[in-house]
Amino acid sequence: MCGRVACTLCPEDIPKSCGINDRNGKSVEPKWSNDSQYTYKPFYNGPPTTTVPVVLYDSKKSKGESGNYSLVPMKWGFTPNFPVNSQALAHTHNARVENVVNSNMYRSSLISNGRCIVVIEGFYEWQTTPGAGNKQPYFIYQNPYETDVKSEDSESNNKYLMKMAGLWTSKKTPDGVQYSCTIFTTESDKTLSWLHHRMPIILNTSDEINDWLDYENVTYAKILPEIKKSFWDRTRNELKLKHYTVDKSYVNKSTCNDPKCMAKYTVKRPNTLDNWLSAKKKK
């Protein structure tokens, strides 16, 4: 599951922070596309329908490898070009990788040029704790180069972006092109199963990233089994996912876009021994 995301980098910092290398090992800074109807703006607590930065690859776009990559602002929530029940659209921000081949919603994008990478700073997940409606939110992020959570005033262009496997589609309108996307999810491994039974598929190496984007040379029939098979083995040793608790009084409001949503927050855990002794005295 991936229901809220965050990306606080300015638009001009996104290309360099994508951390993508081409097939030749050369660092790539994809350029922003200017035909999208949407405009990317930094966000701290983005629910579905938020405009997110998405990396695409087009082998025919340029003779130079670096020129084949582009950044496109897209609505997070897949909206196909055919009529769909409005209730179904409410759940298209995530797509189960196990079902995507047989899905009428996503199959067309999967088998054509619809593979993409959603680049974000991190995502939120809620842990169910004892008590009615008592769920504690966590911020999940990835940064192989840091040992501690950065402070709120850390330099934005030093932040590391996750690369999440996804699908995209588009529709032309008088105001521009309506791009939309979804993020692939799979069963959580032991690094996050304590928090939620689903997690996004995060691509980590240059080969994984380029194989996923290169739909012409790497078919979906080949790439899907590979990312499903290897993902669980990679999460603990290579992805180096990190997490910390955040303040639910901010994060739980989907309309709240405050830096405090991402701030590290110490949760006051109940003292079970004190509670037991207090309850015993009342008897």
Image (tube, rainbow, N blue to C red):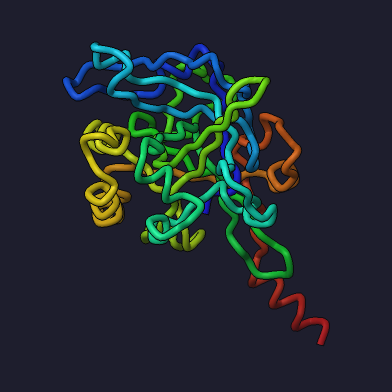
- For this rendering, which residue is in front, 102 or 238? 102
In the displayed structure, would residue 169 be above or below residue 245?
A: above
Residue 256 in sight in this render: yes
- For this rendering, which residue is in front, 268 or 20? 20
Count of labels shown? Answer: 0
Q: Residue at x 33, y 24 (%)?
A: 58
Q: Residue 187, image x and y in percent?
A: 41, 61
Q: Residue at x 58, y 38 (%)?
A: 76
Q: Is residue 86 left or right of residue 34?
A: right
Q: Is residue 255 left or right of residue 226?
A: right
Q: Residue at x 46, y 34 (%)?
A: 118
Q: Residue at x 41, y 20 (%)?
A: 70
Q: Residue furthest bottom?
A: 283
Q: Residue 128, image x and y in percent?
A: 61, 64
In the displayed structure, would residue 35 be above or below residue 89?
A: above
Q: Residue 211, image x and y in percent?
A: 25, 37
Q: Residue 47, image x and y in percent?
A: 65, 41
Q: Is residue 170 left or right of residue 65?
A: right
Quadrant of the image for the C terminus? bottom right
| Rendering quarter of residue 100 | bottom left
| Rendering quarter of residue 186 | bottom left
Residue 188 in sight in this render: no
Q: Residue furthest right?
A: 282
In the displayed structure, would residue 194 be above or below residue 247?
A: below
In the displayed structure, would residue 203 be above or below residue 97?
A: above
| Rendering quarter of residue 240 | top left
Q: Is residue 174 left or right of residue 255?
A: left
